Amino acid sequence: MRIRIISGIFKGRFINVPQSKLLRPTADRVKETLFNLLNNKIDFEGINVLELYAGSGSLGLECISRGAGAVTFVENNFLICKNLKENIKSLKVENLCVIEKLKAVDFAKRIPQQKFNLILADPPYFKDDIYQVVENFKLNNYLKKNGLMIIERSIETKSADIENFKFEPFKIIGDTCLYELYE
């Protein structure tokens, strides 16, 4: 499967998504809405981005296309990381990207080597380690001043998400809930 980059210098280019039950790429409609909302909240030029549960790297590569200065991708599956590297190489942005091959929850437990302007988390919808990730990110202060974390979840997990995150989604698009956490 291939998905497109929707805006910026790589607009219209496609990246590959391996066939895997482990991946659920962000739908174009959700991605377009998300980035339209983000355009009103942040300036992408030169920012430092973290994409958790990176998969194909679609969200982080979209950020680079819009001017992000660096993206750290966190993905623990070896084959999916291999595909991610190929997507990065196809766009010739290796110098802007770092891939961390580990679970998001393990990454979140570390003392941050750097802080991020934007953190994007798109875990498998029914994976609940995202709650621990968010708590560790708050505890370890991963966001820069005025930083923003966006979490994509299923409408089916909304009750548990609200209970654990302690805040409501800021946008619901079909069966997808978007949550935001500010520094």
Image (cartoon, rainbow, N blue to C red):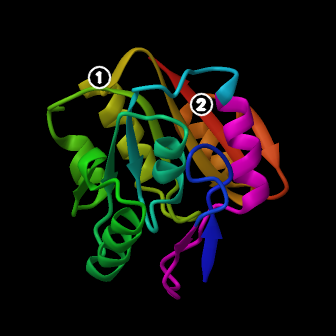
- From the image, tell me which residue sits under label 1: 141
Compared to residue 122, the image places residue 108 above or below, namely above
Measured from the top left, where is residue 30 in percent x and y? 74, 52
Q: In x, y percent, where is residue 95?
A: 24, 48
Name, please, the residue furthest toward the right: 174
The residue to which callout 2 is attached is: 180
Side of 38 relative to 63 (left or right): right
Seen in the picture, residue 124 relative to 44 is either above or below; the reply is below
Q: Position of residue 110 (x, y in %)?
A: 16, 40
Residue type at the position of mark 2: Glu
Q: Residue 47 appears in which quarter of the rendering?
A: top left
Residue type of the residue flagged with mark 1: Asn
Would you identify the image quadrant in which residue 155 lies? bottom right
**Secondary structure of the residue carrying numbered label 1:** loop
5 lies above or below 41:
below
Q: Residue at x 31, y 82 (%)?
A: 79
Q: Nearer the viewer, residue 176 or 113?
A: 113
Q: Residue at x 33, y 33 (%)?
A: 137
Q: Would you say 85 lies left or right of 58 here?
A: left
**Residue span colored magenta:** 14-38
Q: Residue at x 30, y 28 (%)?
A: 142
Q: Residues within 10 Å of mark 1 (few under 14, many from 20)?
A: some
**x and y percentages locating residue 117 in the rendered image:** 41, 25
- The mark tally for this picture is 2
Circle 2 SS class = strand
Residue 28 highlighted magenta (yes or no): yes
Q: Which mark is residue 71?
A: none
Give the mark nearer the N terminus: 1 vs 2. Answer: 1
Q: Describe residue 47's horizontal placement relative to residue 142 as left or right.
A: right
